[in-house]
Image: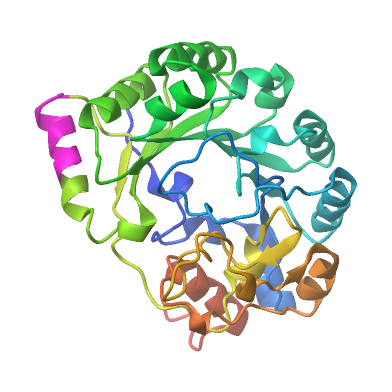
């Protein structure tokens, strides 16, 4: 493993100061000189299908039949590219590798010159083409305390066999930045996390995000602290690439919500949402992308960008993007006495 530690400013956005925005010349120019936020990053949910049924799933109440028609998906991404899109995270919703035209989608996005990241549970990585994997800038694999049971029950696959399969894929695609995201629940298994961390260190992963079940974040803070102690004290494993993210800190949302046009979510029904957290942003969690927070359909996207129709986030009781909204708002509105730095 390279001598490094987790770099939160490269690999995280929630609850961090958004240094990436300050390095993005196109965005800064657009905000300062044109007074417009451009959709740099699309978070795309091509399908709601999933082979797992995790108890903590934040989208467990979704309609699993929903899937973006391929022609509409590509037409939307072509328009997004014209409007300034430079990257897309292919995620869920469901498990994106179940999208029937996954390989074709990746080829089309690559030809558009759009960078791609992939969030997947990793169970089906051997079912897509090596060419698709090689075109990803990064791949983050979602794991949890329930992963061994889910693999065995739904695929008849042991966790160790899955790790061996994953090892071969990672070794064949070293250019890709690989990472894990591990959901911590009340059934925490430090021995499983230790195995995942050891694998990540051996395969030069960029990081592991250890994140509490979002619906029980406050209650699970002691569990996260115990895991950190166990990794360092009992298992004595190098944890420099671990981001211990307990999700216990958030702010109230604001109006306007600037990130709603910077990095909007497109769900499997073709609706545009302000962020990936609408399931838990309101007082009462919905365990689905909250319909009342839809900004429009993908056919409305060009109008949303041109007219800068930001989402009203004042109704959100839980927001993790205060820093992003602060910086974007400052770039758009400006400050007095800017030479007195």
Which quarter shows the N terminus?
A: top left
Vertical relation: 233 (above or below) 303: above
Q: Using residue 112 as the reference point, say whether residue 223 is left or right of it.
A: left
Write down the quadrant of residue 317 in the picture: bottom left
Which quarter shows the C terminus?
A: bottom left
**Region in magenta:** 226-236
Residue placed at 73% from the left, 63% from the top? 271
Q: Nearer the viewer, residue 333 or 106?
A: 106
Residue placed at 18% from the left, 31% from the top? 231
Q: Using residue 225 as the reference point, say whether residue 182 is left or right of it.
A: right
Q: Main secondary structure of the magenta part?
A: helix
Counting from the top left corner in percent of width and height, residue 116 is at: 67, 39
Residue placed at 42% from the left, 15% from the top? 158
Q: Residue furthest front?
A: 153
Counting from the top left corner in percent of width and height, residue 280 is at: 45, 65
Q: Nearer the viewer, residue 63 or 196?
A: 63
Q: Using residue 62 as the reference point, say whether residue 199 is left or right of it.
A: left
Write down the quadrant of residue 250 in the picture: bottom left
Please count the marks in the image.
0
Counting from the top left corner in percent of width and height, residue 46 is at: 72, 46
Whether residue 215 is in magenta: the answer is no
Q: Using residue 88 as the reference point, say whether residue 69 is left or right of it.
A: right
């Amino acid at each position: 493993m390279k001598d490094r530690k987790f770099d939160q400013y490269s690999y995280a956005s929630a609850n961090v100061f958004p240094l990436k925005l300050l390095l993005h010349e196109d965005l800064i120019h657009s905000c300062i000189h044109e007074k417009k936020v451009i959709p740099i990053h699309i978070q795309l949910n091509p399908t709601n299908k999933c082979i797992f049924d995790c108890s903590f799933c934040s989208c467990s109440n979704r309609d699993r039949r929903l899937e973006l028609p391929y022609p509409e998906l590509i037409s939307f991404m072509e328009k997004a590219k014209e409007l300034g899109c430079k990257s897309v995270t292919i995620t869920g919703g469901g498990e994106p590798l179940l999208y029937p035209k996954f390989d074709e989608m990746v080829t089309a996005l690559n030809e558009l010159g759009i960078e791609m990241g992939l969030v997947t549970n990793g169970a089906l990585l051997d079912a897509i083409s090596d060419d698709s994997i090689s075109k990803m800038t990064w791949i983050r694999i979602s794991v949890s305390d329930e992963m061994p049971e889910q693999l065995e029950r739904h695929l008849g696959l042991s966790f160790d066999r899955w790790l061996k399969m994953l090892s071969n894929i990672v070794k064949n695609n070293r250019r890709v930045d690989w990472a894990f995201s591990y959901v911590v629940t009340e059934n925490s298994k430090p021995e499983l996390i230790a195995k995942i961390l050891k694998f990540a260190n051996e395969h030069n992963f960029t990081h592991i995000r250890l994140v509490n079940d979002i619906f029980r974040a406050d209650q699970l803070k002691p569990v996260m602290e115990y895991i950190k102690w166990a990794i360092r004290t009992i298992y004595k494993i190098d944890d420099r690439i671990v981001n211990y993210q307990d999700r216990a800190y958030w702010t109230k949302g604001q109006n306007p919500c600037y990130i709603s046009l910077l990095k909007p979510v497109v769900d499997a029904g073709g609706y545009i949402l302000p962020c990936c957290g609408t399931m838990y942003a309101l007082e009462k969690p919905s365990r689905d992308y909250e319909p009342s927070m839809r900004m429009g359909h993908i056919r409305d996207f060009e109008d949303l960008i041109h007219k800068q129709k930001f989402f009203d986030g004042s109704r959100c009781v839980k927001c993790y993007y205060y820093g992003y909204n602060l910086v974007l708002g400052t770039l758009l509105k400006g400050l007095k006495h800017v030479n007195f730095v």
